[in-house]
Amino acid sequence: MSHPLYIRLHANDDVLIAAQQLVPGTEIAAENVTVRDMIPPGHKIAAHELKAGDPVRRYNQIIGFAKADVAAGQHVHAHNLGMGEFERDYGIGQDVHELPKVANPATFMGYKRPNGKVGTRNYIAVISSVNCSATVTRAIASHFSREKLAAFPNVDGVIALPHPEGCGINTSGEGMEMLRRTMVGFAKHPNFAGVLFVGLGCEQNQIAPLIEMIGQHEPGMLEHVIMQVEGGTTAAIKKGIALVEGMLPKANQYRREEASVGNLIIGLNCGGSDGYSGITANPALGGASDLLVAHGATTVLSETPEIYGAEHLLTRRAAKPEIAQKLIDRIAWWKDYCARTGGELDNNPSVGNKAGGLTTILEKSLGAVAKGGTSSLNGVYRFAEPIDAKGFVFMDTPGYDPVSATGQAAGGAQIICFTTGRGSAFGCAGVPTIKLATNTMLYERMRDDMDVNCGDLITGTPMAEISQRIFDAIIRHASGEKVRSEILGYGNDEFLPWRISAVM
């Protein structure tokens, strides 16, 4: 199939999407429209005349309101399209769609842990309790070079997880609760055979409560070192190295074994979105999400500020009214959070999103929710809460990629699928992050960073084929094949718990 000029997403839409660079005078005969402006790929063209104040639809949903009169064929973007208030029909539970389950679920090769969970990687993690122990944390992990780990071929590595938090905040506040939940989630994560906590000693985020919260753990595979107890930096590094050395033989005993895909929790994320995100990679990932759910797995949509304006599409799929109410309550929390901190939920898309063709948060959100497919919404979780439901669920996170992915991983995600249209180099610590390109031009230009191309949908590849391509990639990477961000060394600096507390 040749490359089309444009895309119409729904018969009721007021805009068309440029599938390539369009110049003034280009005739779109099937729509009886003549292009009047220079239209970059992924940007919107008025399908007919619009009057100032008219609602503008894409995906048959309102993405904003015309700020001025717009002629057919004109570029529709931030100069003539803006936000506005309108009623959303939450229609709780009206679109619940239970997918039939596959009789013989697919399998992958993973690491079966004593607690019944299955990992896609076999790391030892060194985690700071506080920013003050970050240097020691990095030093301990960096000691274990590839040469030093050669005797332990089944261990993927020793990774450092430092962060800028842990002190100067209320010990009983929401921020500390969230930080501890994140650290406990990583400590119990099946991708880590062993965990070493590194603390300073006098910080607010004490290690003892963390150990208590973790509870039962494989003997010898959950350790800690306190700098002030050991006698300072050098002594703590030496002690930490010795503790990790004690874990390596047991970690190396793990072997990949066949396990059902039903053991997987897959994070659905996006970053650097463009005008194609909601057309190609996001709905293709949504198709893969439906496949995963049918095979008994769990998929997790997140980034609450980037489903704002489209949350009604999720509440309509809620399996129970209380699940929908949890999502509505999280949206209300975000509105209050923004009011307290002087922000706005519609202060989005980013500069890069707009350059890629997205104009309002409504438009961005409508494309973002497509990652969640069509199956019922079976749960709503706070940031970093352990995910215990099967099927499609939602976790409340910011839209900022490192924080969002950290929350999903803390909740138990062993793989993250990450769509991008502008080009992201992100990788999550210890959790393989599969990069899905929304357009072929990006895939070819940043081939070193991309794992899967979804852009060939534009030139005729069926959506179902691309969804299967993503599903197959998940199986391969869950079974050990490295993703591009792992090969390039991303991850350690992307561990970023959500900071919401006042820093004192």
Image: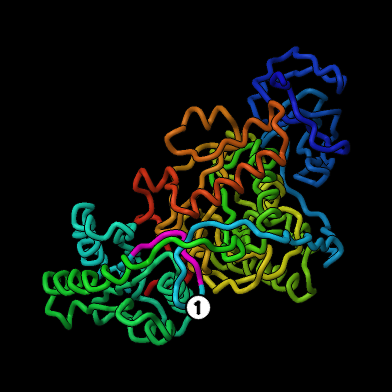
The structure residue drawn at horizontal position 79% and vertical position 14%, both measured from the top left corner, is 27
Q: Residues within 10 Å of mark 1 (few under 14, many from 20)?
A: few
Task: Tell me where residue 398 appears, x and y as whole percent.
Answer: 55, 60
| Left or right of residue 126: residue 245 | left
Q: Give the percent coordinates (x, y) of residue 155.
A: 32, 60
As rendered, which of 237 and 77 lies closer to the eye? 237
Would residue 152 appear left or right of 230 to someone viewing this image?
Answer: right
Residue at 66% x, 64% y: name it: 296
Residue 335 image-quadrant placement: bottom right
Query: For residue 7, which quarter of the picture?
Result: top right
Q: Is 373 a magenta residue?
A: no
Q: How is the image coloured?
A: rainbow
Q: Which residue is mark 1?
A: 174
Q: Quadrant of the C terminus?
A: bottom left
Q: Amino acid at mark 1?
A: Glu
Q: Does residue 114 lie above or below 162 as drawn? A: below
- Residue 189 is left or right of residue 362, and the answer is left
Q: Is residue 121 magenta?
A: yes
Label 1, secondary structure: give it: helix
Judge whether 51 appears above or below 234 on screen.
above
Residue range of the region highlighted in magenta in the rendering = 117-123
Residue 196's place in the image compared with 391, above or below, is below
Q: Residue at x 34, y 47 (%)?
A: 489
- Picture coordinates of residue 113 (x, y %)? 45, 72
| Residue farthest toward the top in the current orientation of the protein | 25
Residue drawn at x 80%, y 32% is 8
Q: In the rendered image, is residue 473 in sight?
A: yes
Give the image location of residue 388, x and y in percent. Answer: 60, 74
